[in-house]
Image (tube, rainbow, N blue to C red):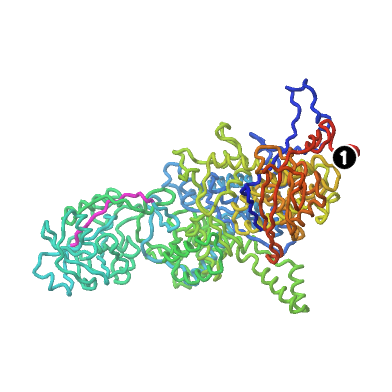
Amino acid sequence: MLWVSAAVRSTPRAWCRTRWVATSGANRNQKARPDAKYRDTVLLPHSDFPVQLPGRLQPETELEIQQKCGFSELYSRQRQRKTKQEFCLHDGPPYANGDPHVGHALNKILKDITNRFYMMRGYTVHYVPGWDCHGLPIELKALSELEGTQHLSAMEIRQRAKEFAQKVIEKQKSAFIRWGIMADWENSYHTFDKKYEAKQLSIFHQMYDKGYIYQDYKPVFWSPSTNTALAEAELEYNEQHVSRSVYVRFPLLKAPPKLASLIDGAPAASLIVWTTQPWTIPANQAVCYMPNSEYSIVKCTDTGEHFIVGADRVQYVAAMLDTEFDVISTCKGVDLESGACSHPTIPGKESPLLPANHVTMSKGTGLVHTAPAHGMEDYSVASQHHLPMDSLVDEGGFFTEAAGSELQNKAVLEEGNETVIQMLQAAKNLLKEQKFTHSYPYDWRTKKPVIIRASKQWFINTASLKAAAKEALKKVKCIPASGMNRMLEMLDRRAYWCISRQRRWGVPIPVFYHKTTGESLINREIVENVIKTVEQHGSDAWWTLPVEQLLPREALAKAGAHSIQDYEPGQDVLDIWFDSGTSWAHVLEGYLKKPMPVTSSSAVLSTLKRGTVSNKEHCMADLKYFRDVGERADVYLEGKDQLGGWFQSSLLASVATRKKAPFKTLVVHGFTLGEKGEKMSKSIGNVVDPDVVINGGNDHSTDPPYGADTLRWWVAESNVFTEVLIGPVVLNSARDDINKLRNTLRFLLGNLTGFDPGTDAVPTAEMYVIDQYMLHLLQGYANKVTDAYKEYDYSKVIRLLQAFHTREVSSFYFSIVKDRLYCEEEKDPKRRSCQTALAAVLDTLVRSFAPILPHLAEEVFQYLPYTRESDSVFCSGWMNTSPVWKKPGLEEAVEGACAMRDAFLSSIPGKNALEHRVILVIEPGLLFELMEVLQPEESSSTSQLNEIMMASQTCLVTEVPRDVVTEGNIIQGTFLINLEGGDIREESSYKVIVLPAAKSKCPRCRKYTADSPETPCARCMEILGGK
């Protein structure tokens, strides 16, 4: 329904507030005010609930609440409930290599809000926290304070790494618990646990058995700073990396047959190639061209030399070389077939011209230098044309002996690069060198550049899994939806996944190598024996047990080998993304996969045998539900970097072994940044420590203690699907918002003193219309909040909460009902009606924010002035509203009155509404009939309509009284009534006449309804007479 005021525009609700003024010490000796003797007869709100918890009180109160309300036992308590509904959020393991930070807080709190919401709605929640404990970052941190680590044995490295990870886990775990995270802390999973490692090897075994895992020699991302292969997910790109790019001459040694007539007799021609990695030139095996593109033979105007470059790149290359080219002839790329060039640094070596689809005309010269050992596309070309793929670079990023004495032992990214450029110059094949700024991959931990280097590694053939993975993702919901597109893009780009790492701290790849030939030995018997050994002794057994216990003789015999002594265990470990990517196998099929409850399963099966068709359909659904428990998590919730990391590795491992995704829904959040949108950095000084946020820093004036709930509010109110900003301004705002909420809660608690919902509640149909309207608004609020939680849109929950408690509850409802609460007799049904609504508002409000602010919710529960059904808000269910609260005509009646009240208040800005009386002139019709429900008599100072108007008296008529002198103070407007879904529509006109109050101010209720300023009004006299 709509209404338009003809005289004044609709303005935000600006309610008058009455204020009880106590006598201060300064005027204690002055003459007593007339209302002083009635002060004790009004029922002012009373509650010990503090409106603020300044300083250390906030974190100290939270700790008390955690202990008193059993935060640590809550997870096990809810697991013991008998419910058919289950909700599983599988925890992506944080890396056990550092202190807890705001990124952890963002992720863990989002998960906790989700879990608490589902628990309160009656679900049994499964949430087993975990830690990613293996890998290079932990190994580096563990060894960072030691000297001479190159002499440590594998077991010494592993022991130090494990001890370091265990310390970090305990520190992070303590922080997560302090943040109020509800989880199965007693049974958390760690990727270094024996059973976890055994399960991981079982997944490896299944994937190897199905042909998805293989060993090959091919180029991979390699980190010289850590001497190991890296996966795409272990890279970060430096957008400001500066390379030494070169334009190189490749002299044409053998003219392509189709161009022979053009080139014969002409000066010797050369191909021009551009590269940002000069160090790869010695490994060149070919020059590639695009078959369908056009190429030009050009003459340099300065030197007379002839060159071949892409036709679209002629002007660009000439400009880069500070010269001009004259085009002699143009040909198709296919015309370059069967040609060959001289190698630019190795005399006598030939580099053939080969077609390739990865060549582009958007940059460079249209011709690509091809080094199969140092490029993914180069490797593909080499495989197709059987080119050598030998790498001239060792594990440390140094040129090997095979590169020649001039390059041997030189770092390829440093002096090796310089030497190659000098070699090109000496051979007169360097046309130009220049610095080139571009995006370049770096090791995610050491922050140093990586290279692409061919080596023998273990791979997962992701190309053969893509179709099945994409099909599985069709059954997965992603929030936001853009995350799914990003994940599919990254999946498409991934041809293979390198899963071997050249480190010690990890799960070993169960393969043996012949000491002489280097040939690998792996089969079912070997892997199954290693799995049993690891399950019993842990992966340390690979380095501590003799080879005889690791390599069964029957496995050796099956492979046709003879002596165990000819073999040694491989030293590569599995990629940590494979570690964490198999967590579903341990957690979802281990901790969380419980058998169907006996009562539930037997009841279902019994009903199937003897039930009706309808019952059978329900039972089949139940059986399907029980069968699905433990197989797939309801939610995986992580940062956007996991679209190419844990989400993807989990998907690939699960699809390979089970043909389905391990998750039903993916929720993807952004990263944390400083409040100005900048990255956090110690040098900038904008790093936010969650512990300092909660407990305060050394100087509380600059780093005050905010408590965990403020941190949780920050998470919830942020748009987590983009980058999330945090800093002092953001945290101060969050604290202020919570204090405003506390103020509303204190008013609710204070006005419920002496009220027990169990015995004093008024039936909905008998409540005041404005109270019923409040319940109507409350139901709408509860439904919207529930929907927002279901969509993981917690910032919307916060917006709904703030709008509801500040506007609808505090500014609107509280302002209207204060007189009834304060001045009516304590047990009067009118007052009880209001308290019934207040109790419902308080209960619904607290439950609505409980998943976000668990400490505040439990604190409020401790101050309830009546008996609680449970000692914890989290054990007593979700918001409980009633469809009875939706009543035809209720909304129209109240909002029609509010429309006229807004017109009245807008006409007296800054003045006390109680000093006025109003006359409402409404033409006969629906609006008038609705107002008569609120005020049956023509004039009243105690009616429901007058309460809404907030005046001292309200007169309801159909015509302007003849004896009223309006002096032009008439406000006109219309109100549109819309009932029965639009079947009943009527627009009614009204007039609001504002006049000064005709009586004196009541010394008790302060309305202008008394005959004398010394004597209370009739309503108050009646109440006082009963005392």
Q: What element carries label 1?
A: helix
Q: Is residue 802 left or right of residue 233?
A: right
Mark 1 = which residue?
1023
Q: Quadrant of the C terminus?
A: top right
Residue 938 picture location, percent across and down? 81, 49
From the top left corner, tell me how far across and down residue 926 is, in percent: 74, 59
Residue 351 sits inside the magenta stretch: no
Q: Which residue is drawn at 80% across and 40% down?
A: 822
Q: Is 669 situated left or right of 287 in this image? A: right
From the top left corner, tell me how far across and down residue 675 is, in percent.
Answer: 50, 43
At label 1, the amino acid type is Ile
Residue beneath the point at 69% across and 67% down: 983
- In this orientation, which residue lies closer to the viewer: 503 or 726? 726
View extreme (front): residue = 962
Q: What stretch is highlighted in magenta?
A: 238-250
Could you say which is closer to the camera, residue 884 or residue 337? 884
State the image quarter where residue 984 is shown.
bottom right
Residue 566 can be seen, yes or no? no
Give the residue displayed 47% in from the left and 38% down from the top: 685
